[in-house]
Image (cartoon, grey):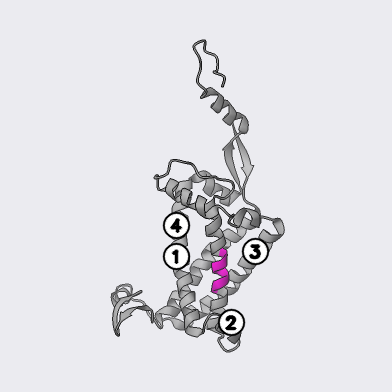
């Protein structure tokens, strides 16, 4: 017998689905800004070995340098990104949901077990409550990354007005590197997150939309476990 179990609150789901398109627009507009001065790559003795976006990339996609457009979108949607993130943090602290998100002392060890299990190397099922150890680490990291993006972004946007933020980031150029590195982190997180959603199945995806999931009732689980017990010669359940 199956039963409906509440899993995610309305505000958690709201902030999750708002954050996804907003962050996508932030990355898209941020690329317009970066393309105006694509300074990053790997060079040795003045010779450029690797650039994040080589010349053939620009030529193939016919990418114009749309700096003004990128800045307009980036700074407009920055407010939605900041307000949505702040709302989520306030709710998490107020509701006590942070206890299910913050990594525990043994989370890093259990996260390794989660990785081995997902790769079908480990046979032991890792502990799973609302979030497993790997999810705790990842979701906490993404919150810290969001705060880092806001801090470094403000340091880049207004380096004179927010000179103290710029100083905390190690200067304008280092703040820009941090901001760019965090963007790469978001892209990697998206890729892993989508793969994990596919592996978790429809029931898990539905819970992030509707807020509930369909699970086996405890009575059904107990009955199945009882049926799996070995029997003795008389057909009765063996006793330990």
Q: Residue furthest right?
A: 94
Looking at the image, do the residues carrying marks 3 and 4 touch, with CB atoms under 8 Å apart?
no
Q: Position of residue 60 (x, y in %)?
A: 30, 73
User: Mark 1 or mark 4, which has the lower sequence index?
Assistant: 1
Q: Nearer the viewer, mark 2 or mark 4?
A: 2
Give the spatial CA distance, label 1 vs label 4. 9 Å
| Element assignment for label 1 | helix
* Residue indicated by mark 1: 187
The first of marks 2 and 3 along the sequence is 3
2 or 4: tag closer to the N-terminus = 2
Quick one: SS at disc 4? helix
Is residue 207 visible in the rendered structure shown here? yes
Location of residue 43 by image quarter: bottom left
* SS assignment at label 2: helix
User: Reading the chain from its start, which is encountered first: label 3 or label 4?
Assistant: 3
Please tell me which residue is depicted at 45% across the width and 51% down the height of the picture. Answer: 115
Q: Quadrant of residue 240?
A: top right
State which region is magenta. 143-149
Could you tell me which secondary element the residue under label 3 belongs to?
Answer: helix
> What residue does disc 4 label?
192
Q: Please tell me which residue lies in front, 107 or 2.
A: 107
Residue 77 in view in this figure: no
Could you give the CA–CA distance between mark 2 and mark 4, rounded to whole angstroms?
31 Å
- Callouts 1 and 4 close, C-beta under 8 Å: no
Q: Which mark is residue 204?
A: none
């Amino acid at each position: 017998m199956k039963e409906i179990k509440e899993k995610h609150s309305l505000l958690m789901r709201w902030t999750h689905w708002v954050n996804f398109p907003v962050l996508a627009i932030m990355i898209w507009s941020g690329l317009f800004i970066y393309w105006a001065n694509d300074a990053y790559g790997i060079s040795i003795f003045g010779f450029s070995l690797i650039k994040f976006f080589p010349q053939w990339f620009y030529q193939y996609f016919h990418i114009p340098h749309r700096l003004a457009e990128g800045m307009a979108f980036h700074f407009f949607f920055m407010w939605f990104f900041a307000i949505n993130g702040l709302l989520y943090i306030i709710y998490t602290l107020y509701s006590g949901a942070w206890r299910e998100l913050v990594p525990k002392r043994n989370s890093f060890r259990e996260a390794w077990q989660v990785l081995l299990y997902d790769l079908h190397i480990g046979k032991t099922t890792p502990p799973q409550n609302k979030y497993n150890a790997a999810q705790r680490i990842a979701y906490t990291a993404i919150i810290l990354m969001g705060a880092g993006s806001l801090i470094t972004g403000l340091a880049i946007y207004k380096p004179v007005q927010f000179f103290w933020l710029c100083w905390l980031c190690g200067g304008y150029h280092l703040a820009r590197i941090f901001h760019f590195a965090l963007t790469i982190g978001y892209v990697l997180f998206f890729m892993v997150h989508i793969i994990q959603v596919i592996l978790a199945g429809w029931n898990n995806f539905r819970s992030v939309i509707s807020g509930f999931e369909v699970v086996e009732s405890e009575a059904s689980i107990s009955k199945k476990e009882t049926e799996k017990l070995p029997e003795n010669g008389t057909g009765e359940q063996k006793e330990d």
